[in-house]
Image: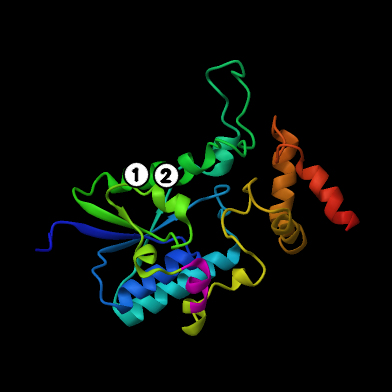
Amino acid sequence: MIDTNVKHIVNFSGGKDSTAMLIRMLEENMKVDEIIFCKVMATKTIGGELPEMYEYIEKIDNYIQETYNKKITVITQEKSFEDYFYTQKKRGKNIGTIYGFPHVISSWCNDRLKVSILKKYLRGKEKYISYIGIAADEKERLERLKENECSMLEKWGMTEKDCLEFLKERNLENPLYEKHDRLGCWFCPKQRIGTLEILKNEYPELWEKLLQWQRDSPYSFKPTMTVFDLDKRFTKE
């Protein structure tokens, strides 16, 4: 017997894995009650993702509305990354110091900008299964899934490569993958050097914002490199 009180909620990020999972679930007529995209804001007016990501999400939203009569629900944290960046610490030895750039290890940004708002949103659901797009070849992430979390990609045996091919066959791939291996916030310190070079060359306004934050941050952008170091390196190259 299927418990009709259980809500089936898909966590959609716009990346290849969650998109492939969502589209296949809809194609196979699986129960999908809600599709959630958690939008991170870098500032009050600038999104945390690259502009092409929001265009892609609109494309997917239009596609699933026209084809399956489903739509994407966008939830947003009240505070932006910049709001937290300039918040002063209220305890510890660095009291009064602003947070600045998050540390690469045990960073504060993912929890405050994504996890907390998602938890708050789901708290209002009595019973639910949260579908998360984790590919079959991401064993460590799969092991961390909670009891009410599920990745259909694992059950289908779909790897990251499979997900990309699945979307290409349907002309639904995210164009950002032409130059990026991984997608995420453009200000993330964990991203690769090559991705940051693309940011400097193709998104100068966003790069200038990173430089501004580095001027004000008590910590370097990466453990051994500031944004200024990267700027000099990319200029020479």
Q: Amino acid at mark 2?
A: Val
Q: Amino acid at mark 1?
A: Lys
Residue at x 54% of width, y 72% of height: 174
Could you say whether the residue bearing mark 2 is in a helix, strand or loop?
helix
For the rendered model, the colour scheme is: rainbow
x, y (%) of residue 143?
Answer: 40, 49
Towards the viewer: 177 or 134: 134
What secondary structure is the magenta-colored segment mainly? Answer: helix
Pointers 1 and 2 in contact (C-beta within 8 Å): yes
x, y (%) of residue 61?
Answer: 41, 72
Badge 2 local density, few (<14 within 10 Å), some, or many (20+)? some
x, y (%) of residue 89?
Answer: 56, 23
x, y (%) of residue 212?
Answer: 73, 42
Question: Which residue was labeled with disc 2?
Answer: 115
Mark 1 and mark 2: Cα distance apart in space: 6 Å
User: In the rendered view, does 97 fall on the left or right side of 120?
Assistant: right
Residue at x 27% of width, y 44% of height: 123
Q: Quadrant of the N terminus?
A: bottom left
Identify the disc placed on residue 119: 1
Residue found at the very far top of the displayed protein: 93
Q: Which span is picked out in magenta?
A: 159-165
- Residue 115 location, quadrant: top left
Identify the disc placed on residue 235: none
